[in-house]
Image (spheres, rainbow, N blue to C red):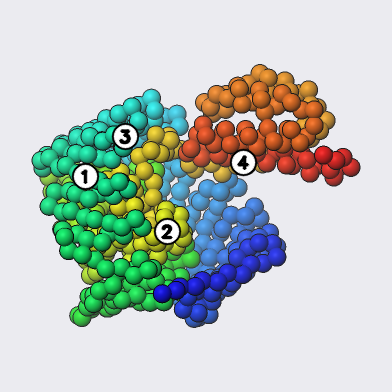
Amino acid sequence: MIKTTKFSYTPTGNLHILKKPDGTKLTYTYDSLGYMKSLVSSRNDIHYVYEYNRIGYLISSRDLIHNTQTYRIVDPHGNIHQETLANGYTLNHCYDSQGRRTDMMLPMVGKSIHYSYLGPYLYQVFCDDFSFTYQYDLSGNPLDNTLTTLTYDSLSRPITLTSPQFYQHCAYDIRGNMASIDSTHGRKEFAYDDYDHLIHEPQNSYSYDSLHNRIAKNDMPLVLNTLNQIESPDHEYDRNGNLIRLGNTHLIYDSLDRLITVKTPTHSYSFTYDAEHRRLTKNHTLYIWDGNHELGTLGEYRILGPTPHAEIGSAITIFINNEPFFPIHDLHGNLIQLLTPDQDLALEQTFTAFGEGDSKLSWGFSSKRHDPETDLIYFGRRFYDPKHGRFISPDPEGYTDSSNLYAFVLNNPLINRDPYGLFMDDYLEEAARQKDYSWRDFAPSLRELGSGFVNGIAGSLINNAEFVGGFGAAGVDLFGISMPGTFGQGFSNTNNLLSTTESLQALSNQTFAYDRNGIGNSIAYGLGMCGTEAAIAYMTRGGSL
């Protein structure tokens, strides 16, 4: 069984035509600056046109097939002050001088949310008469958010969670896998194979092959083909690898492999998306989006706090028919309880490690939306099947996590997360990411700083090597990242630009190693390119290396 995808590129290296396995052609065009101008499908179901402002920020995307448009008001720093979705909903935002959002207005539901900060961290969120306060440890891990209290081990992995109606304590094995959980509902113990796949949880056992395919559950075998697709009378796939039949339910996709129609024996459901792959409608239901985070509908929506892992574990208030409830998430980000304003238990739901359970709310496992008509979970970019522990369509990002395009968090859902259905993150990156609440949005400014540093320091490298040498010998502390040795080695040898270029590239790598959450990476972008820019400038002036 063979599945072939063909790519062709423009002379400048941009993707021009993508020919899918079923023969569908996606054509991409670009403007003179390399920004994507349009995307057209040969099936005539996709035709997007994009518009940017003078500094390259997207301000409009038009869907010429459905005659809809998403447009934004963006400031010079890339902050979105207003976004009108293609379904007609408008969100307004305000920012402080550091680019951090201070206010969000939701006119469609009559809500205004205010955010305040303490240093680099989100400190308080205000909505109506409610406020939520966050406290952090010295590593930037959130300790308290009014209703829940967390503790961590020395690796910044969460250990305990305490809330008014729920308690959870977990332990890890020597490989970093979650070995046991003690909670209000009792004790759970877990086991893993040599690939760190979860093979046992209470009432369920699993086995896998080396390609991260689940091949058995509770001793019931599962057959897969060479493309890692399930072979059974209940499963059927199209030539692009999308699941098109699940039992008596039929699924239809558009040219971008987005699920657009679900047909059950009794009902039919249609979905529409915008150019950023956000599901905006399901039949007559309209969805509210804050960036890439789905907030809900007019009758049921949520207010989010910090979002280091998309919406996972982030909701602080859920309004159902305009009545406020306070969600409680477990240590895995599953929404397990709703509390009343008096902190009484209003609703409770439980899930297995892979998300099977009786969902009573629109959101549950991984804080993602559960579609009751299919029993699938919408992760933002594709749908997840909790019964089989896998996605129903190939990963749009390709082989980012593994060679298996359907695998879910490498079958270790107790420590790994998938924010959008594209790639996973894990607790090994938690410490860096927890520091990312305000810096994440500040990264574009740091890239601008790096670009400015390139333009300014390139001349200094050529005209004033003594300045550069002194700068390096002194050592610096950038955003709390102390690197005296790196800068000393990086700038001490300025006898020729070649050594400077190599030193700056080494500095770029070292900077990234110091900080995995994107701050150092943004600085390293400027520093790493600096030597190259200097070399180009030097050769332009007639020099040689």
The residue most toward the top is: 474
Q: Amino acid at mark 4?
A: Tyr
Which residue occupies the foreground of this view, 234 or 381? 234
- Counting every numbered tag in the picture gives 4
Image quarter of residue 478: top right
Which of the two labelled residues, at mark 3 and mark 2, occupies the earlier sequence position? Answer: 3
- Describe the element under mark 4 as helix, strand or loop: helix
Tell me the CA gap for discs 3 and 2.
28 Å
Q: From where the camera sits, is residue 295 visible?
A: no
- Describe the element under mark 1 as helix, strand or loop: strand
Which of the two labelled residues, at mark 2 and mark 1, occupies the earlier sequence position? Answer: 1
Circle 2 residue: 403
Tell me the CA gap for discs 4 and 2.
29 Å
- Describe the element under mark 2 as helix, strand or loop: loop
Q: Which mark is residue 157?
A: 3
Percent of width and height locating residue 116: 40, 35
Q: Residue at x 56, y 58 (%)?
A: 58
Image quarter of residue 3: bottom left
Which of the two labelled residues, at mark 3 and mark 4, occupies the earlier sequence position? Answer: 3
Q: Residue at x 25, y 40 (%)?
A: 178
